Amino acid sequence: MGIVVDMKQLTLKVLEGHYTIHRFSPQSGIPVEVLDSSLLSITKTEDELSIVCDASIAVSSDTQECDWSCLKVLGPLDFALTGILATLSSALAEAAISIFAISTYETDYILIKTEKLELAVSTLDEKGYDVLLF
């Protein structure tokens, strides 16, 4: 059974910069230039290769979604904790804010369209979360 955490004890931090989400064919190689990104997520499946990286890095991808900002859940988070992303994404969904979530070994990252960042921060603040700006 997972450990239930008081979600309002979580602290999130808005990361500096903007990010782009790229989609490549699953046969594509990983562009070496993305390795210099401050935040880098690479996911490969039988259907696609997805890369999230700094927007300032020029990458020629099949498709891309630009102008994302990122909230980091300050961790490390224990693997036994349950419902963190579900609770945060539900709060943001209530405010009509879509997300792109990334989980790592120690924590979670939530990408939000930059135009919705201010609304996301105020929404989470109203829900009792502590949100730090860079």
Image (spheres, grey):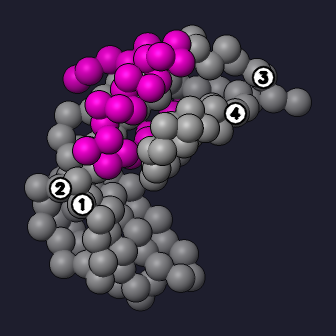
Q: Which residue is mark 2?
A: 55
Mark sitting earlier along the chain (4/2): 2
| Residues in magenta, as a range | 106-134
Q: Which residue is mark 4?
A: 83
Q: Is residue 120 visible?
A: yes
Q: Residues within 10 Å of mark 3 (few under 14, many from 20)?
A: few
Q: Quadrant of the C terminus?
A: top left
Secondary structure state at the residue bearing disc 3: strand
Residue 116, picture quadrant: top left
Q: Which residue is mark 3?
A: 3
Secondary structure state at the residue bearing disc 4: loop
Residue name at image x 28 percent, y 71 percent: 64
Name the amino acid, label 1.
Cys
Mark sitting earlier along the chain (3/4): 3
Instruction: Name the mark nearer the viewer: 3 or 4.
Output: 4
Secondary structure state at the residue bearing disc 1: strand
Secondary structure state at the residue bearing disc 2: loop
Toward the viewer: 122 or 52?
122
Name the amino acid, label 4.
Gly
Residue 60 in percent (x, y) is at 18, 78
